[in-house]
Image (cartoon, rainbow, N blue to C red):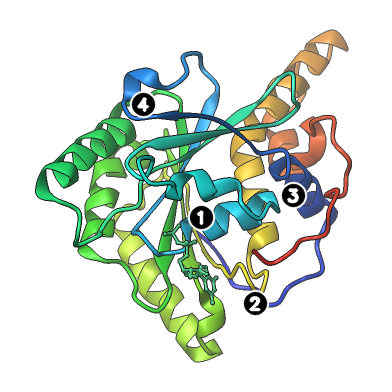
Amino acid sequence: MTESSRPGANALSDSAKTALGWAHTARFLTTASQLVHLPEGDLGEIAFVGRSNAGKSTAINTLAQRRQLAFASKTPGRTQHINLFAMGPKDAPDTYLADLPGYGFASVERSAKLRWQKVMADYLEVRRNLHGVVLMVDSRLGFTPLDKQLLEFIAPRVGTGEVKLLVLLTKADKLNKREQAASLASAQEVLADLATDASDLGMLLFSGPKQVGVGDLAETLYGWTHAHNAAAAAAVAAVATGDAAGDAAGVAATSPAADAPDLPADPAEPLSPV
Ligand code: GDP
């Protein structure tokens, strides 16, 4: 399990800058009320999920360095939909980011709740394209029963390593250091139940306004979505140069920027609070 807690770590590494440059390409693609309306093909998807008000829109906007990217999810009539964003080069997106409906609103009528649960369960359990889940948890509240239910939906695929999981402990700016450490410790306890030899689990203290964890979030997602491409590229290069022993996996692990899309190394705009 990986863990990162570098509050206020504003000095970004080159790999974080590359990853943020990639994240900055996020653009709205489509909205779907049912799974059948999601795009076909095998582009990898990363789902952002969380309780309403946990800070999901803020996290998406902060990651993409765009003020209103995830605004569509809050538009009346779209709150029960899956909103998809494309990432990567304009003419060749390499990843979809799926903003799933927030849950836990007491006011939502029972039939809507059941419909939501079905769509979420179906999406998380069977959507083949799903490569990773980012779960927003309010660092002051910890995991709610609905968060734990969501973990149950994905546990089988997380256990096999097919789906990676990153928990963002949001609003970390509202906690002092001791509380942040306690928040990480209790999240670790919950995640320990999901850990297997094959699982890829992580957690991160996060704050949109204070820019905590943003570079680490971008790097994690970039690694999820580009590691296999880097490995494939290295394998092709090894064959092309006759170096059959080329260690493709080693390239993927040590050089996340090896397969950088055609982007400026630096995000075009400085990170701005949303
Ligand atoms: P969503 O419903 O999960 O999309 O949550 P939002 O992103 O809309 O955030 C809900 C509320 O929490 C808003 O008032 C945000 O301004 C606030 N918020 C979100 N993230 C943070 C954070 O990291 N720090 C602080 N202090 N407030 C946050």
Q: Earlier in the sequence, mark 2 or mark 1?
A: 2
Identify the amino acid type marked 2.
Pro
Q: Is residue 22 above or below residue 177?
A: above
Mark 3 Cα within 10 Å, few/some/many (few <14, many 20+)? many
Beta carbon at label 1 within 8 Å of ligand 1: yes
Q: CA distance from mark 4 to mark 1?
A: 22 Å
Q: CA distance from mark 3 to mark 2?
A: 18 Å
Mark 4 Cα within 10 Å, few/some/many (few <14, many 20+)? few
Beta carbon at label 4 within 8 Å of ligand 1: no
Mark 2 Cα within 10 Å, few/some/many (few <14, many 20+)? some
Q: Which residue is mark 1?
A: 57
- At x 39%, y 23%, the residue is 128
Identify the amino acid type marked 3.
Leu
Q: Which residue is mark 4?
A: 127
Q: Which residue is mark 2?
A: 7
Q: CA distance from mark 2 to mark 1?
A: 20 Å
Residue 1 point in image, percent of width and height: 48, 57
220 displayed left or right of 188: right
Q: Earlier in the sequence, mark 3 or mark 1?
A: 3
Rendered image: mark on residue 20: 3
- At x 25%, y 59%, the residue is 104
Beta carbon at label 2 within 8 Å of ligand 1: no
Q: Earlier in the sequence, mark 2 or mark 4?
A: 2
Q: Of helix, strand and loop, which one carries label 2? A: loop
Question: Do tag 3 and tag 1 residues touch (Cβ < 8 Å)?
Answer: no
